Amino acid sequence: MIRTKWSTAGIVAACAVANWLIGVVLMNLDIEEYSPSFAEYGPYICTGFAVGVVTIIALPFALEHQPRELSDVDYAGSTRSFIAGCIVLLGSSSYFGAASGVVAFISMVSRRSTSRSVAAVACFVAAFAIDAFFNPYMAWDDIGWVGAIFVVVVMVAGLLVGQKRANLREKRWRVEQEARMNREEMRAKVERARQEERESIARDMHDTLSHRLSLVAIHAGALSYPREGVPAEFTDAARTIRTEAQNAVEDLRTVLSALREDLSEDPRTTLEELVATAREAGTQVTVTYADGAGPDVFTGLSTMAQHAVHRAVQEGLTNARKHAADQPVSITVREVAGEVGIEMRNPLPAAPAGDRAGASAGGYGLVGLRERVELSGGRMNVHVGEEGEEFSWSIQLPLAHKEATQ
């Protein structure tokens, strides 16, 4: 996770307040204990205050992180952030830069870089030495081992916090990367399912077109024989139509050999034939025609819509056998307001919630089916109930507006 500008501004503001409070408290302690004159103590305090202002100015650059720090193990940040961090750490020798120095120390040791951690420790120790050298009222006799131990404790605590923060940042980055990859993989699977369904639609349409062109060739062949009273140009035109239709059929068969992996499936199989096959396999299927609809209601659909009905019923019966074996399946067909509606229902068996959730989430067959229905001008709804309820889907397909032919 990369820190935003607002969060950085908040940290800098908090450090500025903390620096001022620490500086005032320590300065008052020195004044109460030593009662120094301004000539003795004034330059030290004024210099320390100026150093504290410099640390606040440099702190935003010391806290600067870049995305590359998480993705590239050998990259620990920009040179600017390193230099600014060292400045802030050396400035922690001032009473008015102590809080900034601690924050910069944690930031430097959290960058997964041994060299930067060593530099942070060295700068922190140097800051302590600078303060001991320039402070007119601080000597080793006054500081002693207690002060040294305090500095060591602060550094160790900073190292632990920095390492913890580095691990959390890396862990969060990995989780975000995995989530992004999962989203991309899911998107790719959905797109692949749609593409496969479009290829299936192309294969089905080629099958139907090949069949219809064969009929055109047959009827054109019957018209191509010379008859008394029929002009020769009509006979020649019929021969041309028959020849071109036969050539088109051969071209389509060549394309089909490349598109279709399994030529045994006929996309023109009727609903009743699909249901009969499912019953032979042991599935209890009931078909109901409602609102005046009958088995011939599908003839009013376009070729692509008829294929969508075949694919939907086939997919629904297959899912019922896989996920709801021995459960009855009901299919309802109705014609309302210029649309043909098909609805399939089956009870959900008792199953672990995780299994059902995975099945519903990973239903790429339904994704492809929805793509096919929408390309046919229709719409599809899917409902997955809880245990003891029903799984159902419904599609609505518009009737094709075709001129009646004799």
Image (cartoon, helix red, strand yellow):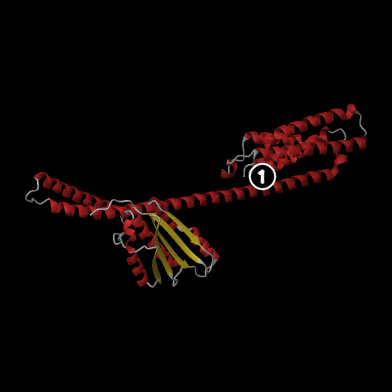
Q: Quadrant of residue 127?
A: top right
Q: Quadrant of residue 41?
A: top right
Asked which secondary structure carries label 1, the reply is: loop
Is residue 305 or residue 100 the one in the foreground? 305
* Residue found at the far left of this picture: 228
| Residue that numbered label 1 is attached to | 110
| Horizontal arrangement in the rendering, residue 227 relative to residue 376 (left or right) | left
Q: Amino acid at mark 1?
A: Ser
Is residue 207 or residue 284 the one in the foreground? 284
Pinpoint residue 374: horizontal percent, then vertical percent. Answer: 41, 51
What residue appears at the point 40 percent right and 69 percent down from the top-left corner?
286
Residue 365 seen in the figure: no
When the figure is inspected, residue 53 is found, relative to residue 229, above or below; the finding is above
| Horizontal arrangement in the rendering, residue 295 relative to residue 227 (left or right) | right
Pinpoint residue 6: horizontal percent, then vertical percent. Answer: 67, 38
Q: Quadrant of the C terminus?
A: bottom left
| Horizontal arrangement in the rendering, residue 76 relative to residue 94 (left or right) | left
What residue appears at the point 68 percent right and 36 percent down from the top-left corner?
62
What residue appears at the point 46 percent right and 57 percent down from the top-left corner?
381
